[in-house]
Image (tube, rainbow, N blue to C red):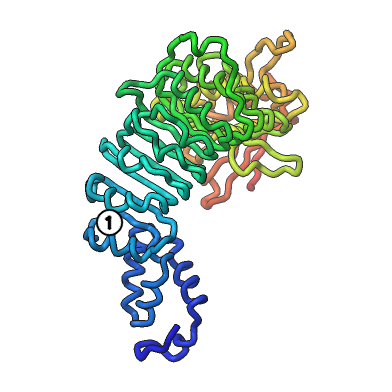
Amino acid sequence: MGPSSNMPHHMTRLPVDLFVPIILLSFDTLNPVRRLIRAEELRLVSKAWQATIDSTPLFWTCIPNEASASEQAIQRWIRKSREAPLHILCTQDIRPVEVFMPLVTPHIHRWQKLEIDGQGSAISKYIKEPAPLLESLTIFAASLSSDEVAFGGVTPSLSSVSLRGVAIPSDLTFLRNLRDFSLRENTDNHQIPPLTKIRDVLGACPDLERLELDAGYTLQVESSMAGRPPIVMAKLSSFILRGSYNPHLITGTIFGMISAPRLASVRFAFDEYWAMPTKNILSSLSTELLLRHTKYTVFISDWRIAISTIDEEGRFSTSPAVAVSVLPDVGSGRAALKILEDVGKAAPLSATVDVILSHSNSAGIVIAYLKSTVKRIDGSWGHPLPQLRTVQLNARHQQNLTDTYETPLSDLAHAQPGIPIIRIKVWGRMGNDDAEVLQWDRTSSSFVSSQR
């Protein structure tokens, strides 16, 4: 940087090629609006800083619909960005889409990331030209014309798309290279879309690695669906399905629509109605990677159920292989039983399964199920989940442990003497963050205390 009377002598020697990366690095934790505000502040430090920041396009690549900025300021930011790729951030509550988008649309060939909160505004006329650099697209509550082809179908770099509250377009060419796709609360001609529509969407992007859907679709038995084979999504590794109070046939049909042999992570956010049918969650979507594991931990709370796999070295997977969120007013009882049933069916008999119930109102239901007698896959009768190795209940010290946990667990220990470990972990009883562990001792037929 050149010398300036307003700067300490040692700062006049800092080369521009070091100064710029250092300042940009300090922007990493700032949101787009704050980045611009900070750039405007720093350019006032001195004439040298002003000249350097104004002549560096990377300081001006995010163009937000900022409330305090005039149209002239937005145009000035665009000019300073020169030919650098742009991040366009448009929010309807600050300046109408119809006012902001015409300012940035002439530079669509430079868009790298586009986020629009349209509040129902029609946006097709702003996204009809090719966007060769576009990598990420987020549209919320906006209207897309069924007659327009988004970006003229030219989006060779587009890999991530999130559409929420948007009518599904008829031309899906712009989705063909996607790796990450979220589709939620969408419509079809202002109606709940049929499942045939989502099949068309998934068929347009076979290289997906991550998929998020809700179950807000109608089930129509049509000749176009009948007998059609599943869509093979060979690269899909993560699948999230959301919804509430949906007919179980919708969920089952979505499962049957997809085959994903490399799927390693499945997450659900549902009420318990999805658990009513006999659909096996672990074997759904051909989750071959999940079924290769031989150690599982099933975690059950009042609002969430998770199945984590454990590798050969005893390490948990980085995220739950299967996670189910349960609505608080419904409870996790029925869903928990369904998960345990599915684990028993899908996991190899040589596998080991640990069940952890955390402050769960469903503990009584789960323990009763584990004590019951069921018909196994081989036709024999016995206790469910023969792979069970550990049953652990996490409790708070204020709870009545004898009636709530100790008595049911001691009954389980007598009913299933083959379970190696049955214990209660009581948090807070020791007066700090440590937990007291009450482990079932078969010799004394009682729980023996220890601190962990």
Residue 441 seen in the figure: no
Q: Can you say whether 356 is above or below 411 in the image?
A: below
**Toward the viewer: 416 or 134?**
134
SS at badge 1: loop
Image point (58%, 25%), residue name: 407
Q: Residue drawn 63% across and 47% down?
A: 451
In this figure, which residue is indicated by the disc labeled 1? Answer: 66
Snapshot quadrant of residue 79:
bottom left
Q: Does 363 appear above or below 426?
A: above
Q: Position of residue 255 (x, y in %)?
A: 55, 21
Position of the N terminus by quadrant: bottom left
Q: Nearer the viewer, residue 276 or 354?
A: 276
Q: Amino acid at mark 1?
A: Glu
- Which residue lies at the image location 33% right of the left edge and 33% below the top edge? 144
Q: Position of residue 244 (x, y in %)?
A: 41, 24
**Image point (60%, 36%), residue name:** 237
Would residue 192 appear left or right of 423 to someone viewing this image? left
Image spot of residue 72 (x, y percent): 23, 62
Q: Residues within 10 Å of mark 1 (few under 14, many from 20)?
A: many
Whether residue 367 sits left or right of residue 270 in the image: it is right
